[in-house]
Image (cartoon, rainbow, N blue to C red):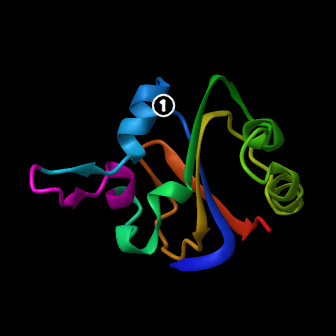
Amino acid sequence: MYKQGMVSIWLGNIKNQSLLYGYVDVTYDEDGDSIPSKFYLDFNIDMDETDEDFIEKDFVSKKSDDLSKLLEGCSYDDVIIPNVKKKINITKPYNALILIYNFEYENNIQAASDFVFVITTRYE
């Protein structure tokens, strides 16, 4: 659900950046109506509760199990990394991340399509 100042984070493994964008990006039909991406469907996210302009996704060529490294360079990383490091310790290497700002993920789907929901935390 929409929540100012919060960011929800997913980690995953995917072959390349193009596939990541295809997994996350919303498409439109010929009438201009939006079609939810597989990511939205997998995690049962209502598109109306998010803003496409506040979604950040990144692909790194080398997998890492260091959450700080994966989040380095994302918006508000100076706030997000310390918040997440206190609460989360990942044990598996990942090469992709999805962040949705001003959104608090509250669904109970924790994993789908090689992606896992990690945490919702403050970014402000």
Q: Residue at the spot x=47%, y=42% of the render?
A: 114
* Rendered position, 95 above or below 45: above
Q: Residue at the spot x=65%, y=77% of the render?
A: 4
Q: Which residue is at the far top?
A: 61
Q: In the drawing, does residue 94 fall left or right of residue 21?
A: right
Q: Residue at the spot x=37%, y=73% of the render?
A: 48
Q: Quadrant of residue 9?
A: bottom right
Judging from the image, what secondary structure is the residue with disc 1 in? loop
Q: In the drawing, does residue 121 fall left or right of residue 46?
A: right
Q: Quadrant of residue 18?
A: top left
Towards the viewer: 66 or 31:
31
Q: Specify the amino acid type for callout 1.
A: Ile
The residue carrying mark 1 is 14
Q: Is residue 66 magenta?
A: no
- Residue 22 locus on image (x, y percent): 35, 37
Residue span colored magenta: 30-41
Q: Quadrant of residue 73?
A: top right
- Residue 31 locus on image (x, y percent): 10, 56
Q: Residue at the spot x=59%, y=37% of the render?
A: 58
Q: Dot 1 surroundings within 10 Å: few (below 14), some, or many (20 or more)?
A: many
